[in-house]
Amino acid sequence: TIKGLVFDLDGVITDTAERHFLAWQRIADGLGISIDREWNERLKGISRTESLELILAEAPTLILDAAGKTQLLDEKNAHYLELIAEITAADILPGIPELLEAAKEGGCRMAIASASKNAPIILARLGLSDTFDSVIDPDALTHNKPHPEIFEKAAQALGLRADECIGFEDSLAGIEGIKRAGMPAVAIGIPTFGQWIPDIEVDATRELDLKKIFSQLAMKE
Ligand code: G16
Ligand code: MG
């Protein structure tokens, strides 16, 4: 039986992707690299350093040393922090408040498994600091998504086995990580899948219904 829920943050609880994009676009512009929203899709769920590497790969002749990269990462985050300062509870995605409420009433434990080092700040802005029993610190991880480590740690932090939890993700890397952890996966707004297939798919967070998810999973067993 399911006793815990493990949530990705960006794209599941709130949509910070546009703010990440604007902050990265400013950095890319400064380097003479142009990125658009479609290109930005590949940065979803990817760590900050990996995101910078993908941007720099667009300008192969540009060579930066470690200090230069660190400076760009700091600049990106400073701009991103300015942008997320505007976030309020109104930025929680549709259907999520109801889902969190239903989970709490049902006695589910809940954790955040986000690649974002800014997750605690964002949760505070959303008024959700006390909602989750655990927020996994991405700095304490050895591997990034699609590795299952963050989801394994989240289940452990809740005192549960992975198969007693459900993972919610909006990125392919995240679905792979959840499935490799041995956890049932709910995919939100992901158009196509590769090797790793989620247990349940919805087009958007507003379609999430905890009772329905529980019964769909029970039918699969
Ligand atoms: C989020 C975003 C990624 C971002 C990553 C790291 O992941 O989807 O685009 O690069 O966090 O964020 P930060 O620069 O704040 O540490 P997730 O796992 O919440 O979808
Ligand atoms: Mg995400």
Image (cartoon, rainbow, N blue to C red):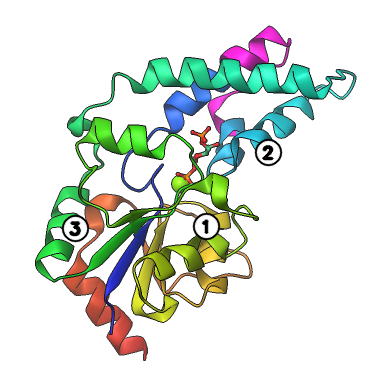
Q: Visible in this render: residue 95?
A: no
Task: Describe the element under mark 3 as helix, strand or loop.
Answer: helix
At label 2, the amino acid type is: Glu
Pick whichever of labels 1 and 2 is earlier in the sequence.
2
Q: Position of residue 203 (x, y in %)?
A: 35, 54
Number of marks = 3
Per the rendering, the mark at residue 174 is 1
Is ligand 2 closer than 8 angstroms to the Cβ of mark 1? yes
Magenta stretch encompasses residue 31: yes
Pick whichever of labels 3 and 1 is earlier in the sequence.
3
Which residue: 40% across, 15% down? 82
Pick whichever of labels 3 and 2 is earlier in the sequence.
2
Per the rendering, the mark at residue 50 is 2
Question: Looking at the image, is 35 positioned above or below residue 139?
Answer: above
Q: Position of residue 49 (x, y in %)?
A: 66, 34
At label 3, the amino acid type is: Leu
Is ligand 2 closer than 8 angstroms to the Cβ of mark 3? no
At label 1, the amino acid type is: Gly
Q: State how far apart marks 3 and 2 are (Cα).
A: 32 Å
Q: Quadrant of residue 33?
A: top right
Task: Describe the element under mark 2 as helix, strand or loop.
Answer: helix
Residue lying furthest bottom in this view? 221
Per the rendering, the mark at residue 99 is 3
Residue numbers of the magenta segment: 25-38
Q: Is residue 58 left or right of residue 126?
A: right
Camera-near label (3 vs 2) is 2
Q: Position of residue 72 (x, y in %)?
A: 66, 18
Q: Position of residue 146 (x, y in %)?
A: 61, 58
